[in-house]
DNA sequence: CGTCTCCTTGATTGAAATCAACTTAGGTGG
DNA sequence: CCACCTAAGTTGATTTCAATCAAGGAGACG
């Protein structure tokens, strides 16, 4: 909670109405905030991966999004959290406490515009996600996910998955088994190579893109 | 296209940077704008229902949202449309031309805040939609849709569907047949009554809510 | 009255879920 | 360092829910 003597993380993005950030570390699977919690902070991923998600009856889970180092998350228009956030891997996160998003937007024009852009980008992603979930087959979903994730790596680099098969499944509206089988099928067709479970070579990116339809 | 001599529709919502609205009528299934079109206007539904949606290979379609009288739609952050819009029923719509959303937001504080709120509400809806599509069964989807739609009617009133089974199916990520069968199943269990295909009585709203899980 | 489009219902198929072992890979502590 | 333990991942057999294929029925409209 207290500021470290060394680097004090200041948010460069929304330059108003918050205290300096507090750095915290989370173990894998640890909850950052839960559905219904008070929304009095936003967050920035420093290292690791965070998932935001929702739970349904019967232990069903829908992962909304994965947040990577540099990403901001946890904005909420209302007073309460509509999603929960958990560390998908061990993660370091900066907490920026604030009053309300409205007050930030009202007082700082530049911050308001950034917030708006953030909301619009999130909306676009959520709509794309809905198409994926509603109208695509298992192989199209997995291919689309791999392409998306691979975008975080340079084209020649291999792809390292930072999340479990369960996380991928819950993001794509599938089961772990189906994700596993689909990846195996892609490997058999020489589209990818599974060096280890988390280390993937995109042997044939063009074919992969075709699979995503 | 030209202004009628009588009532000129002025937008009360985003009070800047557009000409007065032009009223237009659309036949059922008529396109209002298509994916990739220039985004130089936003719209308000006066009567009828509009669907915004996206198309995939193989004729697959995902309906993003239904827009009812009073609803605004067609905001776009970028220069181009990411979704298309079509009249789900015969519809009357006001067109408000504008330069860019950014210019609106930059010049008018109140309009910017409204736009932001609109984006955030849309985001919340899109995220809820993703959960529905990813992790719910056919009966849960249909029940959730009916509850949502019924909210536009007073509790004692019967529900009139303004869209086809195909529209509902494409909104829920199902087929027409599954929607039809699921409604039939609900009727057999005395949860709803299908007076006609489009006229539904919610016989047991509590049971319906349970079905939506 | 005939011809659309929309909707329903039945039969069958099929893709993904479920159930069930089994394997692999990390991580920890002796 | 290695042996054990657990979480994560794979693979196979089977089931199930929804899709597909197919045929009719019900309205709306010229």
Image: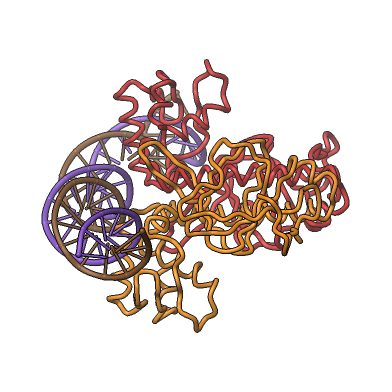
Chain colours: A red, B orange, C purple, D brown
View extreme (bottom): residue: B156
Left or right, residue A108 beside residue B8: right
Q: Residue at x 66, y 62 (%)?
A: A37
The residue sitting at the right extreme is A107
Q: Position of residue C28 (x, y in %)?
A: 51, 40
Nearer to me, B194 or A106: B194
Residue D13 locus on image (x, y percent): 15, 44
Between residues A51 and B15, which one lies in front from this camera angle?
Answer: B15
B129 to A93, vertically: above or below: below
Q: Is residue A95 left or right of residue B46?
A: right
User: Is B152 in front, or is A75?
Assistant: B152
Q: Position of residue C17 (x, y in %)?
A: 32, 51
Residue at x-position 54% and y-position 46%: A127
Q: Residue at x 46, y 26 (%)?
A: A199
> Left or right of B36: which side holds D11?
left
Q: Which quadrant is home to the C terminus of chain B?
A: bottom left
Q: Position of residue B56 (x, y in %)?
A: 42, 39
């Amino acid at each position: 909670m207290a500021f470290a003597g060394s680097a004090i993380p200041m948010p460069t993005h929304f330059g108003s109405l918050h205290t300096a950030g507090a750095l915290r570390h989370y173990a894998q699977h640890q909850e950052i905030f839960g559905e219904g919690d008070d929304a009095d902070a936003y967050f920035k991923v420093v290292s690791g991966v965070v998932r935001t998600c929702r739970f349904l009856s019967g232990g069903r889970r829908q992962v909304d999004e994965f947040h990577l180092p540099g990403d901001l998350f946890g904005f909420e228009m209302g007073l309460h959290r509509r999603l929960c956030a958990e560390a998908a891997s061990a993660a370091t996160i900066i907490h920026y406490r604030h009053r309300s998003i409205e007050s930030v937007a009202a007082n700082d024009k530049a911050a308001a515009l950034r917030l708006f852009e953030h909301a619009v980008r999130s909306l676009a992603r959520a709509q794309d996600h809905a198409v994926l979930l509603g109208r695509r087959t298992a192989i199209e979903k997995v291919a689309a996910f791999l392409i998306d994730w691979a975008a975080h790596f340079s084209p020649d680099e291999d792809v390292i998955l930072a999340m479990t098969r369960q996380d991928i499944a819950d993001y794509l509206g599938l089961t772990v088994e189906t994700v596993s089988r689909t990846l195996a099928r892609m490997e058999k067709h020489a589209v990818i190579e599974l060096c280890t479970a988390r280390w993937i070579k995109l042997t044939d990116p063009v074919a992969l893109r075709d699979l995503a339809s």
